Amino acid sequence: MTTIYLIRHAEAEGNLFRRAQGHWNGKLTPRGLQQADALAGRFAGVRIDAVYSSDLERARQTAGAILRGRDLRLNITRELREINMGVWEGDSWGNLSYNWPEQMYNFNNDPEKWSVPGCESFEACRRRMTRAIEGIASAHDGGTVAIVAHGMCIKIFLMGVMGIDPGDPEAMMHGDNTSVSLLHYGGGRFEVEYYNDNSHLGELSTFARQQWWRDTKKDDPTSLRFAPLDPRSRHDADFYISCYRDSWVVAHGSDAGFMSSVYLSSARSHAAKDPATLLKVLSGDTPAGVLELDPKRGKELNRGWISLVYLLPEFRGHGLGVQLIGAADAYFSGKKRSAVRLHVAVTNTHAIAFYHRYGFRDLRREQGVASDQILMEREIT
């Protein structure tokens, strides 16, 4: 008989950015690192004979918490990866809910019907996970193993083991970050002692800060979507200038030095090079802000450049701004850039604190049009 602790990875950037992160790689967030510490505490006195992990960074980082104080090596395998989401990989959940409503419903509620180009089927994922975990259990017969994998593939595996119909979404909820399931394997059969336990987390729980997931038939209303902004359109151009002007006033206290024609010309140049670099941020169909990226600036240094991050006043203070950083990260990681940079006015203390919170560091102080600016940089996953 083999004892198996099956563990979901800690909170990763994809969770925070609200983006589909099947095989899309990402590291743990600051909260995720705290969750990993709590997980290490939970297992401090537990006998573990071997530790296995998916090869994705968020799982490997989490598995490192189990290894603390143990003279064990980490066994890494692609077979424990999250389900491959095909063309959904790296896209925002807001975009997916808006552009693929039927398939999003299937993904959450009737997974056997879920199918998008390039994806791995739920059944293929179940077979893969079952094969991998059976192999690990057989290799450590009589021992205790810890296995770190991912939320959806763990759910699919557990539903198969417990004989739960995939079309009954209320029968099993998604497990919290670092949630633990305890199984026993012998005679070719799995027995589940408990599943998705997050009692070690307390206030560190990811789910405790969310409410939408409690109704599995609803999409996450806090997930923003991103659509190309057309600066040649009078309506979109006016919206862009209005947002940029307000951002300038917030940063500098007035619009002195703001040159609308210069910034609009730059936006048109960016959009002409790549429409995906000038985006209208939306909540459903409601405009919420603007994200502007410069596809050329910093390229020689293998850096990406963020020209504008802006949310309308009514969307601020709700933890949504990080999704714009996530969109920039997704774009430039696709371009194989190693980091993103931006300028922030030294007078804009709120923005400086925001960027620090999400991994930006100060590089140097530089002269700007209306005030000195801090050049900041954030490493890309």
Image (cartoon, rainbow, N blue to C red):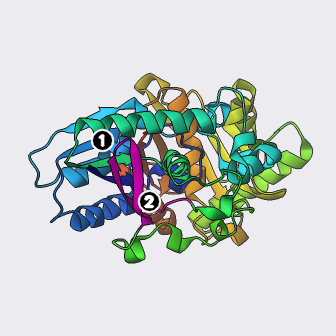
Span highlighted in magenta in the image: 174-197
Which residue is disc 2 drawn over? 177
In the picture, the quarter occupied by the C terminus is top left
Q: Amino acid at mark 1?
A: Ala
Left or right of 100, for residue 73: left
Q: Main secondary structure of the magenta part?
A: strand
- Per the image, the residue denoted by label 1 is 137
Task: Examine the rendered structure and indicate whether residue 50 appears above or below residue 294.
Answer: below
Front-lying residue, 113 or 276? 113
Residue 109 position in % (x across, y down): 72, 54
Residue 228: image quadrant is top right
Where residue 332 sits in the image (x, y, percent)?
53, 33
Q: Earlier in the sequence, mark 2 or mark 1?
A: 1
Spot the residue most to the bottom.
203
The image quadrant that residue 164 belongs to is bottom right
Residue drawn at x 69%, y 55% is: 224
Q: Nearer the viewer, mark 2 or mark 1?
A: 1
Which residue is at the front of the view, 379 or 223? Answer: 223
Q: Nearer the viewer, residue 175 or 326?
A: 175
What amino acid does circle 2 point to?
A: Asn
> Taking the image as drawn, is residue 194 in sight?
yes
Q: Is residue 280 visible?
A: no
**206 shown above or below 137:** below
Quote the CA–CA distance across marks 2 and 1.
23 Å
The residue located at (71%, 39%) in the rendering is: 278
